[in-house]
Amino acid sequence: MSETENRPSNFIRQIINADLDSGKHTGVHTRFPPEPNGYLHIGHAKSICLNFGIAQDYQGQCNLRFDDTNPEKEDIDYVNSIQEDVKWLGFEWSGDVRYSSNYFDQLYGYAVELIEKGLAYVDFLNGEQMREYRGTLTAPGKNSPYRDTSVEENLALFEKMKNGEFKEGECSLRAKIDMTSSFMCMRDPVIYRVKFVHHHQTGDKWCIYPMYDFTHCISDALENITHSLCTLEFQDNRRLYDWVIDNISIATQPRQYEFSRLNLEYTVMSKRKLNDLVEEKLVNGWDDPRMPTIAGFRRRGYTPASIREFCQRIGVTKMDNTVEMGVLEACIREDLNENAPRAMAVLDPVRVVIENFKEDSVETLTVKNHPNDESMGTRAVPFTREVLIEAEDFREEANKKYKRLVLGKEVRLRGAYVIKAERVEKDADGNITTIYCSYDPDTLGKNPADGRKVKGVIHWVSASESLDAEVRLYDRLFTVPNPASEEDFHSVLNPESLTVIKGAKVEPYLATSEAEKAFQFERQGYFCLDSKDGSADNLVFNRTVGLRDTWAKISG
Ligand code: ATP
Ligand code: MG
């Protein structure tokens, strides 16, 4: 079944179905409206999958619109990364990329219309006074002394604002609504402010910029958006959204619907906090594989399909909740279990000498790339007299539960022969430096002829033919499930979120790895070549995820 056929319904789809059935709309047009002030995170992926997914399923359209009304926090780098991330997730927007700033002329015109209707005024209260006049949740606000300025005077003042004749903070344009409303956002909200800031799209054309609440609804209407989907914190603002649309001459009437944000355990999901981590160099950039950003997950080896699957599993509701990291990890693990080729890497090598194997000889073994998928083919794996195995895969003594190599006992080397540990050599401190073994040449691809049972299988690489690699193991970025609720989220950063292993050894086939394309390192987990620091000459692998959900056990 395709992903689309699988997509479960939700309250927003029910609203859309009703609107189509009743003939209120004949098609669906959604939009994804990021502010270009940071990289997209997994929370945005939820909104992307919802908006673009609806457009796909209803043969509708979804726009990508940059909500760019705060030029001082925005950057063209973010504009570019956001487009790349949306494409990487597998979605295509309808037509050109849009910008709220495309509509600055029209927005200005609608502001003038509100002034002409006596529904907006230029206010000279300063920030502190404005707060004082606004009142509180329990006390009504009071009218600004500038509220009753004449239409003519307001028009002239607004024009002066636009022409740069007022300083920043000296005045603003406010909608004239109701200073006693129980919705704070309706107490004469500011809709334009003065800012002498260069804009990444409009340059120095404007020194006044419209506010989000005024801009968003009008942009939706201008783009003929039918269903404007946003997160619950905008619930109250829906009054203002409708007020603006109702009071300007614009034909279409988009509707806003709110759903709950995605929160994920052991991470933070606000661009401001993520930006702090980047600025303070607590992580290595927005695409650090520990970051909950799309770019971070991508660099870590997550696939677009796994993130789309995750968004599908968590669903869309109005209920606030926090999703366990295990849900996301299950999605990538399932994907890679099926689709990632297998390979062998030894992270903590110990030397094994197979004494009855020819010296200076390399035997080429043919090993399947996937145990259950013939179509993934085979690869050549060199076998030599000296191999490396994981130090923890050998014990001098062990009970029956230990299915690895034990002194005097046998184990199978994956894809190769059965070996038997004969004796060990130790250094002055008692650490094992070499395990001397013998091998049974009659066990390649078959069990020992005399019926000996060899249960354990361990991974290995040839000592002489393997390649050096650095392996980066990632853990939770924070030590508590809800770092955002801490007074200072810095205090709960996990100091062990990154472990770098320098002396790993990998089979030669891994020199052909492509960045971001994960392998299953047998018995270790899923790993991919790092897109920034890794290359054929400098193998650096990121652990995408382990083979099993060890986290659930620890936390629960
Ligand atoms: P942040 O609080 O992380 O800075 P934001 O809401 O300011 O996020 P925008 O760029 O304005 O970020 O978001 C673009 C769209 O993505 C909006 O429609 C917003 O509602 C949605 N979105 C942002 N964060 C989440 C989240 N955690 N879960 C679901 N949707 C989200
Ligand atoms: Mg926002």
Image: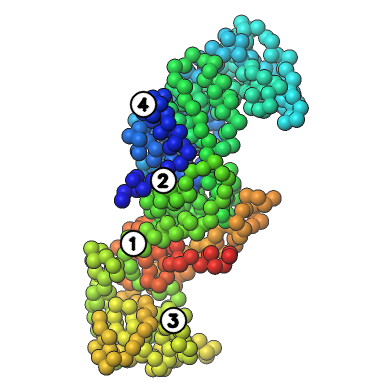
- Say whether residue 164 is left or right of residue 109: right
Kind of residue sitting beneath label 3: Asp
Residue 223 % position (x, y): 42, 25
Identify the mark nearer the N-term, 2 or 3: 2
| Alpha carbon distance from label 2 to label 4 | 22 Å
Ligand 2 falls in quadrant: top right
| Alpha carbon distance from label 1 to label 4 | 40 Å
The answer to whether residue 279 of the structure is visible from this angle is no
> Which residue is labeled 1 in the image?
338
In the rendered view, tell whether residue 259 sits above or below residue 550.
above
Residue 155 % position (x, y): 59, 9
Identify the mark nearer the N-term, 2 or 1: 2
Image point (48%, 39%), residue name = 11
Look at the image and name its color scheme: rainbow
> Which residue is labeled 4 in the image?
26
Q: Which mark is residue 8?
A: 2
- Asked if marks 3 and 1 touch (Cβ < 8 Å), the reply is no
Q: Which mark is residue 393?
A: 3
- The picture quadrant where one finds residue 207 is top right
Any atom of ligand 1 within 8 Å of the CB at mark 3? no
Image point (75%, 30%), residue name = 138
- Asked if marks 3 and 4 touch (Cβ < 8 Å), the reply is no
In the rendered view, tell whether residue 209 sits above or below residue 84.
above
